[in-house]
Amino acid sequence: MRNHKHTRASSASSDPNNNSNSENKTHWQPFTTQNPGFDEYYKKQGIVIVPSDWDTFVEVLITLLPAAFRINSSSQFCEDIKSQLEKDFMNSFKVEITYGDEVEAIRPLAWYHDNPAWHSNFSRMQQGQNQTLERFHEFLKLANEIGNITRQEAVSTVPPLFLDVHRDHFVLDHMCAAPGSKTFQLLDIIYQSTKPGSLPDEMVIANDLDV
């Protein structure tokens, strides 16, 4: 799948009187999302049956995925984080969004039981100063750094749920475990099924290529 990546580019002023500090300023520019080799390969696969649908297919592939994260149930602050999301941030964002047809800025993934996984969408939020958005980013940054949440795409949370791990299962995460969000999710599921103060009966064995 195509990804949007960013590269650092120099930003020099056309004003000859500007000092060197302005010449050293940088900004971020997106890489091109066009790839003739990609187009040629997938056209040969016959994935898109109707040729006129090709542009729509490509447009879907290059659409940025919304940010998502999962609250780690092993964190002692799990319920506190969930409460802050539901009672603080959700309400604050409703006040600051100015578009009448805007979807919820943040919301739990409806198909994940007990609301540990969340989706955020700021693509159409009011631009400029937004104190709640800034506070929310800092909240996520800190929670991620200390292990209270895991940044994980919504689609990435699906396989462990379908695996339906039980107390007597050994899970082999074979050869492709990095970066580890699904592996951590499996461990989280095991943690939830373990009685407080006891060791789990399950096991997760994670492997990846040694480079």
Image (cartoon, helix red, strand yellow):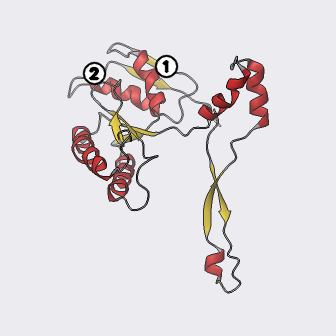
Sooner in the amino-acid sequence: mark 2 or mark 1 = 1
Of the two numbered discs 2 and 1 in the rendering, the one whose residue sits closer to the viewer: 2
Q: Give how far across and how far down residue 79 sits, in percent.
A: 22, 38
- Seen in the picture, residue 164 relative to 67 is either above or below; the reply is above
> Where does the C terminus fall, quadrant-wise?
top right
Answer with the quarter of the image where residue 151 lies: top left
What residue is at 40 percent from the left and 54 percent from the top?
A: 126
Q: For this view, does 203 lie left or right of residue 61?
A: left
Helix, strand or loop for disc 2: helix
Q: Give how far across and how far down residue 84 sits, in percent.
A: 24, 45
Answer with the quarter of the image where residue 62 lies: top right
Q: Which residue is mark 1?
A: 172
Q: Name the amino acid type tagged 2.
A: Ser
Do the residues under discs 2 and 1 have CB atoms within 8 angstroms? no
What residue is at 71 percent from the left and 77 percent from the top?
A: 14
Q: Residues within 10 Å of mark 2 (few under 14, many from 20)?
A: some
- Judged from this view, the residue extending furthest toward the bottom is 17
Q: Which residue is mark 2?
A: 193
Answer with the quarter of the image where residue 24 lies: bottom right
